Image (cartoon, rainbow, N blue to C red):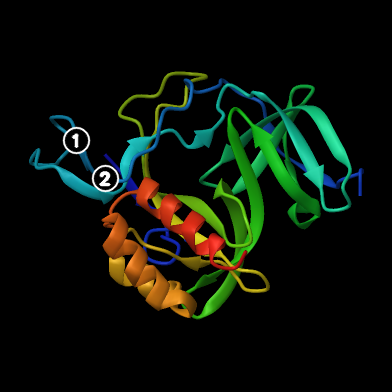
Amino acid sequence: MKAIVIVIVCAFMISASIQIKAQSKAGTKPASVTEFTSAQGEYIPPAGSGNTGAPIKYPGVENEVYVGSDWPAGIIVLRNGSTIDNYYLRYNILEDQMQFISGKDTLAFASPKELNTITFGGHTFIYEAFQCENTIRKGYFELIEPGKNKLLLKRVVTAELDPVSVTPGVDSRKYFIDECYFISKPGQPASKLACNRKSALAVLHDHSAEIEEYLRITGNKVKTPEDLKKLVIYYNSLDE
């Protein structure tokens, strides 16, 4: 079993007329996307693969490489305020592309900076600059909590495993997906916000005293994505 390890972003995160470019022919669609979780994945190669059978650890969990693999209809809001609907959309995590169907082709938006929000299947995505170690990059994030300071979710493929057997028309490769949360402050690239107290106090340092008191009174341990969401809601309220 051949394993292709994908470069991990930042230590497990990394006009009405829009120009488009063709990416590939539309093929067999994977099964519907399932709920993502943040956990450590395990993969046990089959007998005869040359491996002893000991689990191989990959960051994240085994999951689909698409959000919206069943191509739900969506709505696109452009930076200029124009709205485009009736697009059938999905997000390709591996390629970090927002894709749509045109005839028999699968296409991707070539100028994502023209997009304000992309909404489909209960998900809303935005295209943002973010801090990655010592560089600034850009990519798609799911918008978890809107507001002056936005809580964002970045999904990253950490490993791609070749299939044991190949079935024509079926993508049987296995992907491991990890999740990272970011906060986007006005005029700044988004920065990573981990699910822990230390990260929260460091990233939200401009209101550290209020955050400390909030955590003490509410008992928010900053251990889960829901804890992060509540924390960002409170953080936004401090500037109202």
Between residue 65 and residue 196, name the one nearer to us: 196
Expressed as whole percent of the image width and height from the top left, the position of residue 223 reads: 28, 54
Residue 34 shows up from this direction: yes
Image quadrant for the N terminus?
top left
Which residue corresponds to the image point at 58% horizontal and 21% vertical from the top-left?
A: 70
Q: Using the image, determine if residue 107 lies above or below residue 60.
A: above
| Location of mark 1 (residue) | 45
Which of label 1 and label 2 is nearer to you?
2
Q: Does the CB distance between marks 1 and 2 fall below 8 Å?
A: no
Give the secondary structure at mark 1.
loop
| 201 or 177: nearer the viewer | 201
Residue 72 drawn above or below residue 119: above
Residue 105 pos. (x, y %): 74, 28
Q: Residue 136: x and y, percent?
A: 59, 74
The residue at 62%/73% (across/down) is 188
Dot 1, crowdedness within 10 Å: few (<14), some or many (≥20)? some
Amino acid type indicated by mark 2: Ala
Q: Is residue 195 left or right of residue 102?
A: left
Q: Would you say 227 lies left or right of 82 here?
A: left
| Residue drawn 9% across the image and 42% down it | 54
The residue type indicated by label 1 comes to Pro
Q: Which mark is residue 8?
A: none
Q: Which mark is residue 39?
A: 2
Residue closest to the far front: 217
Quadrant assignment, res 125: top right
Which image quarter holds the C terminus? bottom right
Q: Earlier in the sequence, mark 1 or mark 2?
A: 2
Judge left or right: residue 189 versus residue 57.
Answer: right
Q: Secondary structure at mark 2?
A: loop
